[in-house]
Image: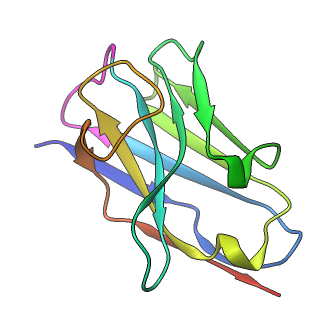
């Protein structure tokens, strides 16, 4: 059974930082891109960041460029999202995603597996 389990969400003040983790189990995601999406209340799920299997290719949404950094540790089957300089508009549920291809950015259509989500709340 494939599982993606996120952790690291929480409440933080604007300007603060959080690091999200996504632990994958049940299979290896060799040669699969992975990434993060988010969904705010009343809004559609949107791409945040993606990373190729090797880590050599990454992609970030314009709204998080220069503030968020995605990385992965293939030995541990974990993907991270370091979020700095958080803003109130970053408040959302954040979802880990595993693609069926090794192409970034990841799209909703190319996502094969989802985590259950972790909530991030940034207070102004």
> Which quadrant of the rendered structure holds the N terminus?
top left
Q: Which one is in front, 54 or 87?
A: 87
> Which quadrant of the rendered structure holds the C terminus?
bottom right
Image point 70% across, 55% down: which residue?
63
Q: Is 68 on the left-hand or right-hand side of 15?
A: left
Q: Is 99 on the left-hand or right-hand side of 118?
A: left
> Does residue 61 lie above or below 57 as drawn?
below
> Does residue 89 lie above or below 123 as drawn?
above
Question: On the image, which quarter does residue 116 sit in?
Answer: bottom left
Residue 2's spot in the image, x, y percent?
Answer: 17, 42
Residue 99's spot in the image, x, y percent?
Answer: 30, 32
Q: Which one is in front, 70 or 88?
A: 88
Residue 90's spot in the image, x, y percent?
Answer: 67, 70
Image point 80% across, 49% down: which residue?
67
Question: On the image, which quarter does residue 87 sit in?
Answer: bottom right
Q: Which one is in front, 85 or 109?
A: 109
**Range shown magenta:** 24-31
Q: Is 83 on the left-hand or right-hand side of 72?
A: right
> Does residue 72 lie above or below 115 as drawn?
above
Q: Is residue 30 magenta?
A: yes
Image point 71% across, 52% down: which residue?
64
Residue sticking out furthest to the left: 1
């Amino acid at each position: 059974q494939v599982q993606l389990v996120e952790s690291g969400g929480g409440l933080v003040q604007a300007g603060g930082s959080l690091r999200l983790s996504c632990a994958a189990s049940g299979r290896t995601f060799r040669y699969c891109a992975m990434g993060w999406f988010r969904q705010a209340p009343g809004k559609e799920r949107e791409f945040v960041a993606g990373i190729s299997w090797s880590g050599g290719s990454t992609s970030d949404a314009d709204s998080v460029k220069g503030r968020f950094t995605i990385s992965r540790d293939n030995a541990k089957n974990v993907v991270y999202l370091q979020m700095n300089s958080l803003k109130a508009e970053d408040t959302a549920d954040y979802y880990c995603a595993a693609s069926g291809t090794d192409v970034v950015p990841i799209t909703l259509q190319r996502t094969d597996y989802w985590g259950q989500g972790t909530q991030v709340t940034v207070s102004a």
